[in-house]
Image (cartoon, grey):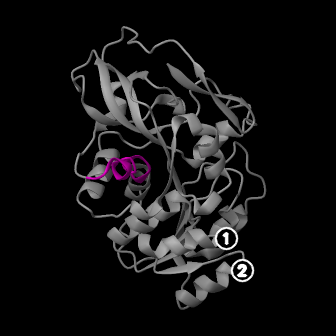
Amino acid sequence: MLAGEIYAPKKIRLIEVPEAQLDGSSGQIVFQPELGCLCASDFLFYEADYPEYPPVVGHSLHELIGSVVQSNGTRFDVGDRVLCVPENQEGLFERFCVADDRAIPLDDRPAPEHALMAQPLGTVIYALRKLPNLIDKNVAVVGQGPIGQLFCGALRNLGAREIIAIDPVESRLKISPSMGATAVVNNQRDDPTEAIRTITGGAMADLVVEAVGHREQAFNLCVSLCRDFGQILVFGVPTKIVDGLHWQSVMVKNISVQTSINPDFSKDFPLAMRWIAEQRIDVAPIVTHRFELQDIQTAFETFHQRRDGALKVLVDFPVR
């Protein structure tokens, strides 16, 4: 069977590997992907320049739907269709073995490409569950990649007054209102702090969501947008050590900082699936590109380089 291998920075290819098998532990499935989706966190492996994240065969994919082809547990039967999140993002295989508690049933009401968005949306829901009531709050979402867009949609559901989308990429900002943003700010063209001050009548943001992470450190911008005694939700995965953070400003403004990682499989992904299935949130605007597995290099390049307004880039797996 085929698997992905990152063999050099920003270079990925398909290689033949042995067929996946149950390893004897109870409560496992062999999962066969049908459709996957790239995530910015996959760049930690694709860029291949972080010693704490050495790429191995199977890196990097973790947003997947497909079917169960073997099972030694009680949660799923052979043939069940599920959303599955592999350990350590090692999901770029035609089939792989995984604990069955890392999968949830797939709702058959939405289109598969929309049901797949329950994985990233579940991570957003998990983050927002950590926060107090958001009704009538002014919220700035820094970063309008796929996650930032999903935050806009979720915040609309939760009753935020202003949902201000901030990003330097104009093509992304054109999508943001359809996902729930009440205002957009191009921070390459306009001063985002002054824009937030104007939109909120001087109050500034009650909550700032950092949905950038990784290389492009945006924490200090979040601090400048946040009101005194406000809150910053740091969602974007940073590098291991981030220099230059304005912690004194955080303290002077009495800002609370919340982080989020590792959602609850029993709550967050099922709720996200339900939101999508019941059309409480429309994820269609962020699904922009789709490639065959054999074109995995082009898929990564398209997503990494934000070609043609790329947001969510999907990968179709051959079923054999």
> Which residue corresponds to the image point at 27% horizontal and 15% vertical from the top-left?
72
The question of residue 33 being in magenta is answered with: no
In the image, residue 113 lies in the stretch drawn in magenta: yes
Apparent side of residue 201 relative to residue 30 in the rendered image (left or right): right
Give the side of residue 156 with respect to residue 233, left or right.
left
Task: Tell me the quarter of the picture where residue 306 sits.
Answer: bottom right
Question: Where is mark 2, residue-wise?
Answer: 189
Label 1 and label 2: CA atoms lie apart by 7 Å
Query: For the view shown, which residue lies furthest in the right direction?
Result: 244
Residue at figure coordinates x 42%, y 77% from the top left: 137
Q: Is residue 138 above or below residue 26?
A: below
Q: Which mark is residue 168?
A: 1
> Is residue 259 among what the camera can see?
no
Magenta stretch: dominant secondary structure: helix
The amino acid sitting under disc 2 is: Arg
Which type of secondary structure does the marked residue at label 1 adopt?
loop
Picture layout, residue 245 above or below residue 238: below
Q: Is residue 167 left or right of residue 126?
A: right
In the rendering, at what x and y percent does residue 262 appear?
46, 41
Task: Please give the name of the residue rendered at 74% of the width and 31% of the height, measured from the top-left corner.
Answer: 51
